[in-house]
Amino acid sequence: MSYDKVLQAKSFIVGTKQTVKALKQGTVDEVVIAKDADPRVTAKVVNTAKEMNVPIVYVDSMKKLGKACGIEVGAAAVAISH
């Protein structure tokens, strides 16, 4: 389901650093986090999303999340923005 959201999103940001940056700018509607990503990598994204009251959706696979974003490598975090 969440992979479909990423596929249908008009605008999304891939990667933890860029996601945190977008969260701080207030342009994110939802954050998608891969459950198989290292928690040390995703912790800052999760904490920032909670601070900004942005919903967090978890998906099972970094590889599938990356594929949904159209990239060949896994993605730990994706921000769906408006």
Image (cartoon, helix red, strand yellow):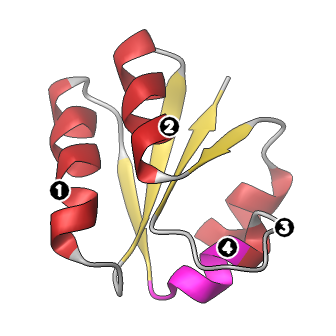
Image side of residue 22 versus residue 49, left or right:
right
Q: Amino acid at mark 4?
A: Gly
Residue 62 drawn above or below residue 78: below
The mark found on residue 66 in the picture is 4
Q: Amino acid at mark 1?
A: Ala
Element on which disc 2 rests: helix
Residue 9 place in picture, x, y as percent = 78, 45
CA gap, disc 4 to disc 3? Answer: 6 Å
Residues rendered magenta in the picture: 60-66
CA gap, disc 2 to disc 3? Answer: 17 Å
Q: Amino acid at mark 3?
A: Gly
Residue 37, quarter of picture: bottom left
Residue under the image location 50 percent in, 37 percent down? 18
Residue 11 place in picture, x, y as percent = 77, 35
Residue under the image location 52 percent in, 53 percent down? 15
Q: Quarter of the image containing the C terminus?
A: top right
**Earlier along the polypeptide chain: callout 2 or callout 4?**
2
CA gap, disc 4 to disc 1? Answer: 19 Å
**Earlier along the polypeptide chain: callout 3 or callout 1?**
1
